[in-house]
Amino acid sequence: MAHVTFQGEPTTTRGELPAVGEQLPDFTVVGTDLQELTPADFAGKKLVISIFPSVDTGVCAQQLRTFNQKAADHADTVVLSVSKDLPFAQQRFCANEGIDNVVSASAFRGDFADKLGVELEGSPLQGLLARGVVVTDADHKVVYTQLVDEIGEEPDYDSALAALA
């Protein structure tokens, strides 16, 4: 269990992010085409897994926009943006915003929240994902993690992307 806050009020997650040096857990999410995605679908690529509660909030939308912009500079990397939004909502948002440098995926079914320890409990956002970032090398060994302390704040983009070097 990890401790974060939502609007200044303490809450927890049902687990913890994988530690730096560990192998990324195998998980399943659902792409905007409703097909299942796993880390194996990105074999040989570094991963930036951008995790957030819902694309329908300002901070989450900005996180998606920012990683989309910064991802364009990293041809050897896939940015996987994961929330519990339905794939239809993610696809609509990305189309409306011109977001095409990230892979959007939904954790509405699958084991992502459990495997990465990011499902919120005990707050108005209970059941959604906490805000965080996991970065792996091309072999999907974890090289950086951040669970954002306050869900309403953006992650440290620069540190996450520096971990790709």
Image (spheres, rainbow, N blue to C red):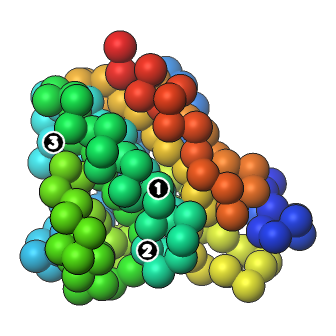
Q: Which residue is mark 1?
A: 63
Q: Earlier in the sequence, mark 3 or mark 2?
A: 3
Name the residue located 73 percent from the left edge and 85 percent from the top edge: 124
Tell me which amino acid carries mark 1.
Answer: Gln
Q: Earlier in the sequence, mark 1 or mark 2?
A: 2
Task: Identify which residue is drawn at 21% across, 38% down.
Answer: 72
Residue 19 location (% of width, % of height): 57, 32
The label nearer to you, 1 versus 3, is: 1
Q: Label 1, label 2: how many angstroms apart (C-alpha)?
A: 9 Å
The reply to whether callout 3 and callout 2 are in contact (CB within 8 Å) is no
Identify the residue under disc 2. 55
Name the residue carrying label 3.
Answer: 42
State left or right for residue 115 relative to residue 47.
right
Of 19 and 86, the residue lying toward us: 86
Answer left or right for 124 relative to 75: right
Left/right placement of residue 144 relative to residue 105 reads: right
Horizontal placement of 80 versus 52: left or right? left
